[in-house]
Image: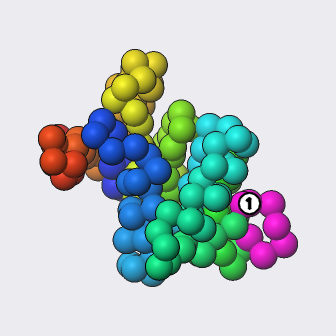
Amino acid sequence: MTEILFYHLETQPLERVLPVLVEKSLERSWKVVIETGSEERAEVIDQLLWTFRDDAFVPHARAGGDADALQPVLITTRPHNPNSADVRFFVDRAVPADGGDYKRIVYMFSGHDPEAVTEARTAWRALAAGNELTYWQQDAGGRWVKKG
């Protein structure tokens, strides 16, 4: 059974939340794959992980290189797992179809995008059977609160 976390972004943008969650995954010695909805957004995420903090960066690469299997974090637009990741992040309108062979899936969607909210509801119903689903939403202070 895969643990699937739905993160409903409202008070903080993806660019502030994603790097922190990826770092926490690496602290657990998990490999990570990040699936984006487009090549343009993959490029933005690539740059973000190098520059999101002055005192650190997240070691990563774009999928498609000879050393993909060795990368701790890969960014892709395809539904493959070239680095045998433990956790997969779905961002920027990339939507999980199933739990796969991951320990955890993190599905992040914007609460300010009605189409993304509709996609999240559809994904929740589709993924409910055979997976452990939790729903997280930010409170007014930006803290994550488990809602379901």
Image height check: is 59 above or below 118? below
Residue at the location (74% across, 60% down)? 63
- Give residue 69's position: percent from left, percent from top: 71, 74
Quarter of the rendering containing residue 7: top left
| Residue positioned most to the front | 54
Q: Quadrant of the N terminus?
A: bottom left
Q: Main secondary structure of the magenta part?
A: loop
Residue at 60% x, 53% y is: 45
In the image, the segment drawn in magenta is 62-68
Relative to 83, is 57 on the left or the right?
Answer: left
Q: Nearer the viewer, residue 40 or 124?
A: 40
Residue at left 69%, top 67%? 61
Q: Where residue 5 appears, x then y in whole percent?
A: 33, 49
Task: Give the percent coordinates (x, y) of residue 144.
Answer: 21, 51
- Above or below for 105 versus 128: below
Secondary element at tag 1: loop
Q: Is residue 140 visible?
A: yes
Q: Does the magenta run of residues contain 65? A: yes
Residue type indicated by callout 1: Ala
Residue 26: image quadrant is bottom left
Residue pointed to by mark 1: 63
Residue 11 magenta = no
Q: Would you say 81 lies left or right of 126 here?
A: right
